[in-house]
Image (cartoon, rainbow, N blue to C red):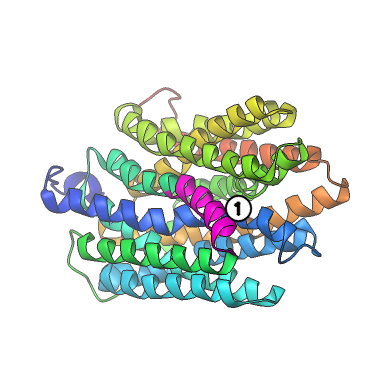
């Protein structure tokens, strides 16, 4: 595989500048997307108060579906033309979708502006950012990607707090517009700093059929499929859950920030550790434990302390999964086609990402506000996915405790 034979220099200024740019890009894109729970709770009390949680959750789920589904096309364009065109267009789309969100009034308009259009902008910023970082590193690839991915966690901490403050002080419309301006400035800095190590090849395929024929990769996709059914449910519903436990709306908003704060540590520390003990060796247990934490901690969290403990724990574990999954893809891939490989996986897991939130909302509505079935669904889906991730690791090397 090219990724092990090709020489790398891990300390180049250009490489670490790309990490910084990717951090900023993910802060504004994926970090802002993980803050959708803020909008879910706000819409339930304001603009879309007449609609059920099931209906509102479709906005966030469309974000995720568009983001994941566009992984294949964006990866193809990245391999063919490099990161800059994608980052420029992605910045424009992200800013436009956010401004439109401040102007719309109808449910279908929220679906289009904040759901589809925003998810497209996130995809065009997220994939080229991480793929560019991956091309610069070998030995410390997971660490570098983990540092860049921490931008998502930082964004997930800052955006809920900032948006809540802005909504209360200047109103929803101007609060969203201020967010669009700040995001646009940071994205411009990302455009100026992110470069790929390899020259563009002006060719590519949207979904790599050879990847699907690789049993290691197929099992990795299958595991990620089931993990993604449940993994975003806590991010969507933890604020609303906290309110049902008699927490004030202001306090409930901070619970989501606690979860994202946990993901900051989860994206960096486990990534560094995975470079030492093996990336698949860390991916499998973190996925399993994140599902288990839903069944053990979230199911029985009834006050602010236990909810905060679950939020921090789950944020750490889910952050570790999303930090290590990309290095796992690159570990079994040709680095000159890494954009297409990463995009193929994310495109194939777009469907569960679309369905997870609405199914959770339907279960919540079916149980008339009780979260028991929703939590059980999230936790069991993630645990099932971890079993396929373990199978992928064993397909690489059948020894359970070897360095993989």
Q: Which residue lies furthest to the front in this view?
A: 169
Q: Where in the figure is residue 303, as x and y percent of width and height?
A: 71, 28
Give the SS element for disc 1.
Answer: helix
The residue segment tinted magenta is 155-171
Q: Is residue 321 magenta?
A: no
Vertical comparison of 145 with 181: above or below? above
Q: How many labels does the image show?
A: 1
Q: In this view, does 64 lie to the left or right of 85?
A: right
Vertical comparison of 149 with 54: above or below? above
The quadrant where residue 48 appears: bottom right
Mark 1 = which residue? 38
Q: Specify the quadrant that holds the C terminus.
A: top left
Q: In this view, does 371 lie to the left or right of 163?
A: right
Q: Is residue 163 magenta?
A: yes
Towards the viewer: 171 or 132: 171
Q: Where in the figure is residue 337, as x and y percent of width and height?
A: 30, 61
The quadrant where residue 388 appears: top right
Q: Is residue 126 left or right of residue 308?
A: left
Q: Where in the figure is residue 399, as x and y percent of width and height?
A: 43, 25
Q: Residue at 56% of width from left, 44% of height from top?
A: 223
Q: Is residue 287 left or right of residue 186?
A: right
Examine the rendering and report whether any part of residue 341 can be seen.
yes
Q: Where in the figure is residue 373, as x and y percent of width and height?
A: 80, 41
């Amino acid at each position: 595989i090219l990724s092990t034979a090709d020489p790398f220099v891990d300390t180049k200024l250009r490489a670490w500048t790309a990490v910084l740019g990717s951090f900023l890009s993910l802060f504004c894109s994926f970090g802002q997307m993980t803050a959708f729970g803020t909008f879910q709770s706000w819409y339930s009390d304001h603009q879309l108060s007449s609609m059920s949680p099931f209906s509102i959750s479709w906005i966030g789920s469309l974000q995720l579906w568009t983001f994941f589904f566009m992984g294949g096309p964006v990866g193809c364009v990245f391999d063919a033309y490099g990161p800059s065109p994608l980052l420029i267009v992605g910045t424009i789309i992200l800013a436009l979708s956010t401004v439109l969100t401040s102007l719309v009034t109808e449910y279908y308009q929220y679906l289009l502006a904040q759901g589809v259009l925003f998810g497209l902008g996130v995809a065009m910023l997220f994939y080229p950012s991480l793929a560019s970082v991956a091309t610069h590193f070998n030995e410390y690839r997971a660490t570098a990607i983990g540092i860049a991915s921490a931008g998502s966690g930082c964004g997930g901490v800052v955006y809920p707090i900032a948006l809540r403050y802005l909504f209360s002080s200047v109103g929803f419309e101007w609060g969203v517009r201020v967010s669009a301006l700040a995001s646009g400035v940071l994205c411009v800095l990302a455009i100026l700093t992110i470069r790929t190590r390899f020259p563009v090849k002006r060719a590519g395929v949207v979904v790599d059929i050879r990847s699907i024929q690789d049993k290691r990769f197929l099992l990795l996709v299958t595991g990620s499929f089931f993990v993604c059914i449940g993994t975003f449910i806590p991010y969507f519903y933890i604020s609303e859950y906290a309110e049902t436990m008699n927490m004030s709306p202001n306090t409930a908003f901070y619970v989501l920030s606690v979860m994202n704060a946990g993901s900051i540590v989860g994206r960096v520390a486990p990534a560094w550790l995975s470079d030492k003990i093996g990336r698949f060796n860390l991916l499998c247990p973190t996925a399993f434990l994140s599902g288990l934490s839903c069944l053990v901690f979230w199911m029985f969290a009834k006050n602010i302390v236990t909810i905060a403990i679950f939020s921090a724990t789950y944020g750490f574990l889910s952050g570790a999964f999303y930090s290590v999954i990309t290095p796992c893809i690159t570990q079994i891939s040709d680095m000159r086609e890494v954009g297409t490989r990463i995009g193929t996986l994310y495109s194939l897991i777009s469907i569960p990402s679309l369905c997870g939130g609405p199914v959770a909302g339907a279960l919540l509505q079916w149980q008339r506000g009780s979260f028991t079935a929703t939590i059980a669904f999230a936790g069991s889906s993630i645990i099932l996915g971890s079993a396929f991730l373990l199978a992928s690791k064993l397909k690489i090397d059948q020894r359970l405790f070897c360095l993989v």
